[in-house]
Image (cartoon, rainbow, N blue to C red):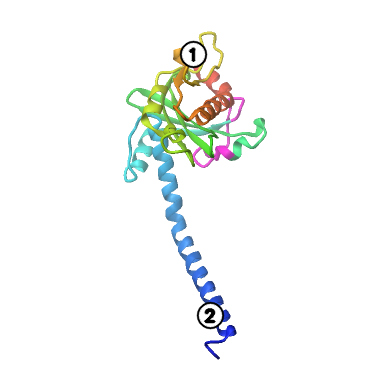
Amino acid sequence: MDRNGNTYTFIYAAVMVILVAAVLASVSMALKPRQQKNVEIEKKQNILASVNIESSADNAEELYAEKIVNEYVVNVNGEQAEGNAFTTDLKKERAKDAQDMLLPVFECQTEDGLKYVLPVRGAGLWGPIWGYISLNEDMNTIYGANFDHEGETPGLGAEISSTPFEEPFKGKTIFDESGKLVSISVLKSGQVAPEEHSVDGISGGTITSKGLEKMLQDDFTSYKEFLIKKKS
């Protein structure tokens, strides 16, 4: 075959494309179990972070097995249901009708007593935001918070995953004195709200801050019946 001809060039290019695609597909399949494992480890680290337990990729699984003493799912009526809390995808659950939703709950034994960890998920300015909130046994006082995002702007909305933003959530309460669920307000500059139910928003990240506020309101509302039953 004439190596300078168009037919040779076309066949050569086609063979190379097929070979490269096959190699990439094989590498992807080979790495997929490791990628899934890394995702699981990161999720365990985030759950532990919400109860103020630092972990590394090396010890996260051991700490998770030691500290997370129970995990289950509940429905919006606050009743336990069949399902796996760790693998339940809150994004998919929130797309369902409320009565069909399954809501994960993780119970963690800490030095300060038993804590309840609830996942939360919402929308920021540029994409999804999510996280975990832990509550004391009164099902009202926040023990810790851990947030993350997909594509918020560094130095602005991305600050929701920073310690200075997460720390002020500790000690805040989500029910008022009358027992009404009020969640947590994320305040813009100049806004005022009861101190026990509010934190300062991010300067220059108002839309993400308000998205996080809505996320908490929506997800605490989904868990409301569970919280009321547990604290009564």
Q: Is residue 189 above or below residue 30?
A: above
Measure how far apart labels 1 and 2 are at the Cα level.
Answer: 69 Å
The label on residue 192 is: 1
> Could you tell me which secondary element the residue under label 1 belongs to?
loop
Look at label 1 and name its amino acid. Val
Residue at 48% in and 38% down: 152
**Residue 227: x percent and y percent?**
53, 21
Q: Which residue is drawn at 37% across and 43% down?
A: 61
Looking at marks 1 and 2 on the same chain, the residue that comes earlier in the sequence is marked by: 2
Q: Position of residue 23 (x, y in %)?
A: 47, 69
Residue at 32 percent across and 46 percent down: it is: 58
Q: Residue at horizontal 50%, vertical 28%? A: 206
Is 90 covered by the magenta stretch?
yes
- Asked if residue 72 lies left or right of residue 167, the reply is right
State which region is magenta.
Answer: 75-91
Residue 169 found in image quarter = top left
Magenta region, main secondary structure: loop
Q: Which of 85 and 194 is in front in this view?
A: 194
Q: Mark 2 points at which residue?
A: 12
x, y percent for residue 85: 51, 37
Classify the position of the N terminus by image quarter: bottom right
Residue 151 at x, y percent in the picture: 49, 41
How busy is the neighbourhood of tag 2: few (under 14 within 10 Å), some, or many (20 plus)?
Answer: few
Viewer-closest of 229 and 55: 55
Answer with the quarter of the image where residue 81 lies. Answer: top right
Amino acid at pointer 2: Tyr
